[in-house]
Image (cartoon, rainbow, N blue to C red):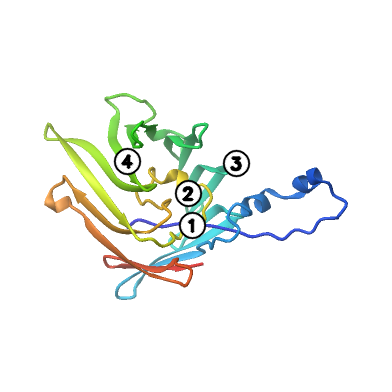
Amino acid sequence: MKRLSSVLGMIAIALLASCSNDEFVDTISDSETDAKLNPNLPLVKRIVATTNSGTSVSTDNYTYSGSKLVRVTSSDGRHVDYVYTGNLITERDYFTDNVLNSKELYEYNVDNRLINYRRVNAVNTVTYRATFSYNSDGTVSVAGYRGDVVSTSAQIVNRKVFFTNGRISSMETYRTVNGSPVTEVNNYTYDTKNSPYKGILGFDKLTYHDTALNGNMNNITSISTTGVSAANSVNDQIQYTYNNTNYPVTASRGSIVFQYYY
C-alpha cells in the first residue's frame, strides 16, 4: 500500500514603524517567509488508513514549518524527516523507532528540475541511483542503477514519463523478459479537484520520482497497466469524497479507505 503525504503554514508579524524595508526583511524568520509562499492553502495534518471493515491500518501525522514539511510520523513507530535547501526538498531521512534506516538525496539543475536521486543506507552506502533527463518532446527519461555507478551493466530501471496538461498521463517502463524487450505502460486519469499535497513546498518537483504521484495538483482516479502478464496487471479505481473547498476527505482504493484531516 502506498503512503500519501502533505503541508502549509501562516504568519502574523508586528514590527516597529521605524524599520526600513531592509530591516523588515532581516527580521522575518525563514518559516515566516516560507509560509507566505502558500498562505491560503490547507495542509493535511493527518491521514488515517483503515480497511473496509473498519480495522485501523495506520495513522500518519504531518508536522510543518511554514509551507515546508518537516516530519511524517506513523503509528507503527516509523517517521520520515524532510530536509530543504531553500525551497527544494534535498533529503528525506527514514527512521524506525528513532534509528536511521536510510536516506534519499535529491539534486536539481539551475531550473529547479530534479536531475539526480540517490538512496543511501544506514552506513552511508549508495544502494540505488537514478538520473532524470528532460527531452525536447516534453517527456522525462529516468535511468536507475544498482549502486552509485552509472553503467549499462548496473542499470535496472529504464523509464519514460509522458505529460498532458502538466500532469503525468503515462509512464513507460522498458524491460527484457526471457530475452525479449517488453514495454510496460502505466496510464493515469485524474479528477479536477485539489490534491491534499497541493500546498507542500517542493513536492511538485518530485512527481516523477515518486510513482505514487503525490506531487500532482489533482487526484488520481484510475491507474491501468498494460504490457504485463494478466497476473501482474493493474486496473485500480480510486473514489473520493470532498469538502466544500474541493479537497478530498476520503479516498477508497480497493479494500483500503484513507481519511484526510486538514
Which sits in the foreground, 181 or 255? 181
Residue in the image at 30% along x and 75% along y: 53
Amino acid on which disc 1 is placed: Ser
**Upstream in sequence: badge 4 or badge 3:** 3
Determine which residue is flagged by label 2: 203
Q: Secondary structure at mark 1?
A: loop
Quarter of image, res 171: top left
Residue in the image at 79% along x and 59% along y: 14
Q: Secondary structure at mark 3?
A: loop
Determine which residue is flagged by label 1: 6
Amino acid on which disc 4 is placed: Val
Question: Is residue 164 placed above or below 43 in the rendered structure?
Answer: above
Residue farthest right in this picture: 18
Q: Is there CB contact under 8 Å for labels 1 and 2?
A: yes
**Upstream in sequence: badge 3 or badge 1:** 1
How many angstroms separate mark 4 from mark 3 (CA)?
Answer: 27 Å
Residue in the image at 26% along x and 50% along y: 187
Determine which residue is flagged by label 3: 86
Q: Nearer the viewer, mark 4 or mark 2?
A: 4
Determine which residue is flagged by label 4: 161
**Upstream in sequence: badge 4 or badge 1:** 1
How many angstroms separate mark 2 from mark 3 (CA)?
Answer: 13 Å
How many angstroms separate mark 4 from mark 1 (CA)?
Answer: 23 Å
How many angstroms separate mark 3 from mark 1 (CA)?
Answer: 18 Å
Q: Secondary structure at mark 4?
A: strand
Residue in the image at 61% along x and 58% along y: 39
